[in-house]
Image: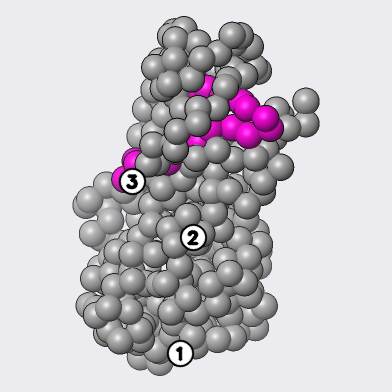
Amino acid sequence: MTLDFAPRLIAWQQSHGRHDLPWQGTLDPYRIWLSEIMLQQTQVETVIPYYSRFLASFPDLATLAAAPDDSVMARWAGLGYYSRARNLHAAARRIAAEHGGRFPQQLDAILDLPGIGRSTAAAIAAFAFGQRGAILDGNAKRVLARVFGIDGWPGEKAVETRMWALAEALLPESDIRAYTQGLMDLGATLCARARPRCEACPFSDDCLANRQGRHGELPGARPKKSIPEKATAMLILLHGGEILLEKRPAPGIWGGLWSLPECPADADPARAAASLGYRAETADRCPAHIHTFTHFRLHIQPWLLPVERPLAAEEPGRLWLALADLNGAALPTPVRRILEAIRQA
């Protein structure tokens, strides 16, 4: 089946694949690059509105390269995995400085940009420039593992190496755009993690997972680990309808976003506020929040503290934001939810 895998996949994609996604129908490498970065670890349905809003603010590479950091992070806020936005911005600036503002066409040059790995670089090169290169995103891994019966967790080095070799061997000599899109489409629409629609798959008769009833086993699952639990307190320092925010350092969790000042979960919130230079007569406990990251779960205890705002200018990295202006701010999702509750109270 190795020899006819690509022709069958291309024929299926052209007849049954996705053709109306917002980033399809263009050869603009900027738009293709943006979509590929946004789609890393994020579902299409989630990405579409963010993609449209981002392009409304930054319609081309030059606009993005010239934009302030806060503007970029504000348009990304809520999409998660914020290092993607920081890398996207850094790459745009590098392209402006080192490539005359034109997105590079060579695979090695694309791969050299911040935030772009081997699979993403190949996808951009295929869709924008028609270049042959293997992709191995989550959808492609699932399709190859099931069709060809590759055991093991794809994150394991030996399994990943085997998959890359297979992905390279399957590449067609032509129609690379349809082939690459076909791998993505097949994994996203038919060869789903749960309840795959094998009856509609062009490889149903040859797929080893289908023939052996091993859909649930392939690809192999990530070894289970307990998720660490962490806790923090967030201080909502309120004055005249405004709250104090601090800019998170990059890199790191929520790097580059504006967040609430924090202190240890068992600390006295009034004392913590005093250490920042603000006197609070009262500290009211707000409803707790839980936010789950990829590698840990964070328990957040917010405290509402009415304070007097000092006359002196704020230290760098701090600002006062009106609660009425939350929508335009670059805030982490749980912080936005906490402040929305305060605004609506």
Q: From this viewpoint, which residue is outermost toward the front?
A: 311
| Residue drawn 33% across the image and 64% down it | 90
Q: Which residue corresponds to mark 2?
A: 72
SS at circle 1: loop
Q: Position of residue 101 (x, y in %)?
A: 35, 84
Q: From this viewpoint, which residue is outermost toward the bottom?
A: 174
| Residue drawn 46% across the image and 45% down it | 257
Q: Quadrant of residue 196?
A: bottom right
Specify which label sits upstream in the sequence, 1 or 2: 2
| Label 1, label 2: how far apart the Cα atoms are | 35 Å
Q: Position of residue 188 (x, y in %)?
A: 57, 62
User: Would you say residue 244 sits in the magenta stretch?
Assistant: yes
Q: Position of residue 148 (x, y in %)?
A: 39, 62
Residue type indicated by callout 2: Val
- In the image, which is nearer the foreground, mark 3 or mark 1? 3
| Label 3, label 1: how far apart the Cα atoms are | 41 Å
Specify which label sits upstream in the sequence, 3 or 1: 1
| Residue drawn 41% across the image and 47% down it | 256
Checking the image for residue 175, the label placed there is 1
Q: Which residue corresponds to mark 3?
A: 250
Residue type indicated by callout 3: Ala
What is the magenta range?
231-252
